[in-house]
Amino acid sequence: MADPSDLAAALAPSQQQPPPARGPLQSILDWFGAQPSAAQQSMQAHEAAAQMPFAERLKYIMSNDPIAQSFGVGNMRPYGNVPDSLMGFRKTGPNVGFNESNYPHTQPVKITLPNGEVFNDEIKGMNLEHALERARRNWEGSTIEALPATANER
């Protein structure tokens, strides 16, 4: 037979404090065992950057805040969201050749193809960034690096 003091202790109200209340979102995250949400990562990035000088704070947030990144903040490719039709590429048929292009800026580039082949070429654009974006689209999937312009091209 069980000791009556053990039975009384088991039936007595608990002296332990209840766990702290948690919001429904945190409870769901705990249940799934998920990584921190984008909102949590964003908040952490902003809290970590709060004491930084302004320029450093912006750079830190642009590289660590998934919400800001999803809106294109910190996009280092100014022409990245411009449609091909506005970048000088035709929807159908052959594109205009290099010598027939009327863009004012000629940019030497180093192209590294996905298979590792490397070569240098030139591409035209309105300016340096426009030309580099045209090169990225022309040699899709390749790594494009701007080379210095020669003295007679500056």
Image: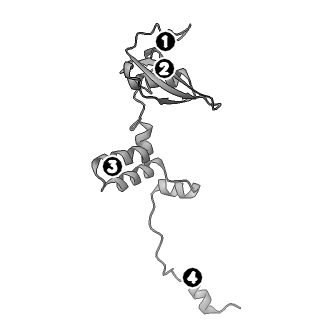
Q: Foreground residue, 64 or 36?
A: 64
Q: Residue at x 61, y 87 (%)?
A: 7
Mark 4 is surrounded, within 10 Å at the Cα level, by few (under 14), some (14 to 19) or many (20 or more) other residues, namely: few
Q: Secondary structure at mark 2?
A: strand
Q: How is the image coloured?
A: one colour
Q: CA distance from mark 3 to mark 4?
A: 56 Å
The quadrant of the rendering that contains the C terminus is top left
Q: Amino acid at mark 4?
A: Leu
* Mark sitting on residue 11: 4
Q: CA distance from mark 1 to mark 2?
A: 9 Å
Mark 1 — residue?
98
Q: Amino acid at mark 2?
A: Glu
Q: Amino acid at mark 1?
A: Phe
Q: CA distance from mark 4 to mark 1?
A: 88 Å
Mark 3 or mark 4: whose residue is earlier in sequence: 4
Mark 1 is surrounded, within 10 Å at the Cα level, by few (under 14), some (14 to 19) or many (20 or more) other residues, namely: few
Mark 3 — residue?
57
Mark 3 is surrounded, within 10 Å at the Cα level, by few (under 14), some (14 to 19) or many (20 or more) other residues, namely: some
Q: Secondary structure at mark 1?
A: loop
Instruction: Residue at the far front: name it.
Output: 151
Q: Foreground residue, 5 or 139?
A: 139
Mark 1 or mark 3: whose residue is earlier in sequence: 3
Q: Residue at x 62, y 31 (%)?
A: 114
* Mark sitting on residue 131: none
Q: Is residue 94 left or right of residue 69?
A: right
Residue 123: x, y in percent? 47, 19
- The answer to whether the residue labelled 1 contacts the one labelled 2, judged by CB atoms less than 8 Å apart, is yes
Q: Amino acid at mark 3?
A: Arg
The quadrant of the rendering that contains the N terminus is bottom right
Mark 4 or mark 1: whose residue is earlier in sequence: 4
Mark 3 or mark 2: whose residue is earlier in sequence: 3
